[in-house]
Amino acid sequence: MSWWIVILCMVFSLILVEKKVRKRRRNFPPGPRGLPIIGNLHQLGPQPHLSLSTLSKKYGPIMYLKLGSAPMVVASSRETVKELLKTHDLDCCSRPVLTYSSRFTYDNKDLVFSPYNDYWRDLRKMSVVELYSSKRVQSFRHIRQEEVASFVGFLNQSGLSKTPVNFNRELMRLSGSVICRVGFGMNLRGSNLEDKYEEVVFRAMEVVGSFPAADFFPYFGWIIDRFTGLHAKCEKVFRELDDFYEEAINLHLGRENKDGQEDIIDLLLKMEREQVGFGEFTLTRDHIKAILVNILLAGIDTSAQTVTWAMTHLIRNPRVMEKVQAEIRERVTDKDNITEEDMEHLDYLKSVIKETLRMSPVVPLLIAREAMRDMKINGYEIPKKTRIQINARAVHHDPDVWKDPDNFIPERFMDNNVDYKGQNFELIPFGGGRRMCPGLGLGMALVQLSLMNLLYRFDWKLPDGMKMEDVDLEESFGIVISKKVPLQLVPVLTQWS
């Protein structure tokens, strides 16, 4: 009997060896050797986008890693990204099912994290037409103008008292106020998120952008996440956000929309009443909340951080600051009422924004895709179910594409057609292909209006005792990158304030 056990063990061992050899013969992209069980997880570090950029310099623009049991391919060059987002977009436009993003989005019922299926296609079509269309973005113009005017009033008071402004905090408040009125038809002030929304949004982005053990060790990773406290953090943030969605929805259910101005919850509740379907699904309350997740989290954080990074780079580059302020002050037509139409005449400010998005993309690692079928990229095999990670930060700092990539030079965008709308693969802050961010227009409208007012109405100086070189570019990692040390600037009142 014991001989049979020995023979079975030998056969089993040979099968495993043969399987490993066969796998080894497959032409996977190059990549660093991993450790048993954890693979390459230990090489990600506290700033994964920077660690992956460093590894890609050694292993090339397409790189294979194993994160626990999950295979992942990282793309870090314009050409490779173009292959993925254009040539093979339909082959890899799904999403991997991830533990905590699934929880926040009510089992992936949102637009960002939903796998590619009939529901996602119908939701995308509805979102583009109803929620994020140019007409819808323009309909909320008065809200942006009112909230920015209120923010300017706050800056005037800070200027009079010569009090430094915490840009990280105050721009989150501005963005939060706009998004809550646009999406939820309610003021952030007085809601149950008023005193803690900045912390809640930050912690939500931190959890969603993390690398939880549950995603890489399916059988026991959840134990690790409970031990580290990540699971408890997720549940706490989820409950706080869910309470806010309930508050906003109940507010709409208890009122009549007399002025005819529909916000996004009005529209979604109407679709719920009319039993609008998405593929095999009918819109439910959880679907509504999942859609609101994208509006609240993505809408608040990305706009606020983009303006913060723009002001960070400008204060570190006085030449650029002086040039962009001169352009705005010369070309703005109505000095008392800056409007979004003024942006049409501000070519250098447009370049400043593009350069900010290149230097400091607020989502440096685009949300992971998943290969829907076997495919080949640059001659390498990418098996079905492989996670595909696009490192936008590495692409934006590629010295083969950008001259002096680590320097802030807006002039590089003057007199060329490179834009951030998904057609130029050397500049992909909002992704590209089918999974490109649909809320681009809504977010950038606030970014542009905010910067026009900040740069037209005020001069800016550092707090007493602080030098320009003290303003660093250190990042706090999450799915959205914020400045680790808050930007503090003092507004100086001018004749236009």
Image (cartoon, rainbow, N blue to C red):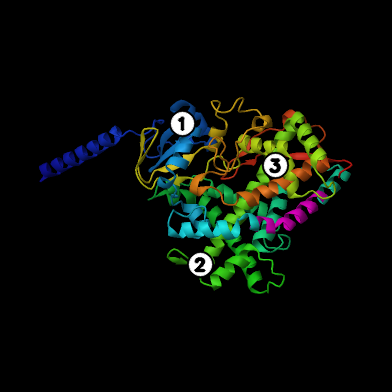
Question: In this view of the protein, which residue sits in the foreground, 127 or 220?
Answer: 127
Of callouts 2 and 1, the N-terminal one: 1
Of callouts 1 and 3, the N-terminal one: 1
Contact between labelled residues 2 and 3, with CB atoms less than 8 Å apart: no
Residue wearing tag 2: 283
Residue wearing tag 3: 308
Question: Can residue 360 be seen by looking at this rendering?
Answer: yes
Q: Is the magenta stretch mostly helix, strand or loop?
A: helix
Q: Classify residue 418 by image quadrant.
A: top right
Task: Determine the residue positioned at 48% across, 60% down.
Answer: 122
Residue wearing tag 1: 61
Location of residue 273 with respect to 291 vertically, above or below: below
Task: Determine the residue positioned at 71% across, 73% down.
Answer: 258
Mark 2 and mark 1: Cα distance apart in space: 41 Å
- For marks 1 and 3, give the one nearer the viewer: 1
Location of residue 100 with respect to 496 vertically, above or below: below
| Residue type at the position of mark 2 | Leu
Is residue 342 located in the magenta-colored stretch of the structure? no
Which residues fall within the magenta stretch?
136-152
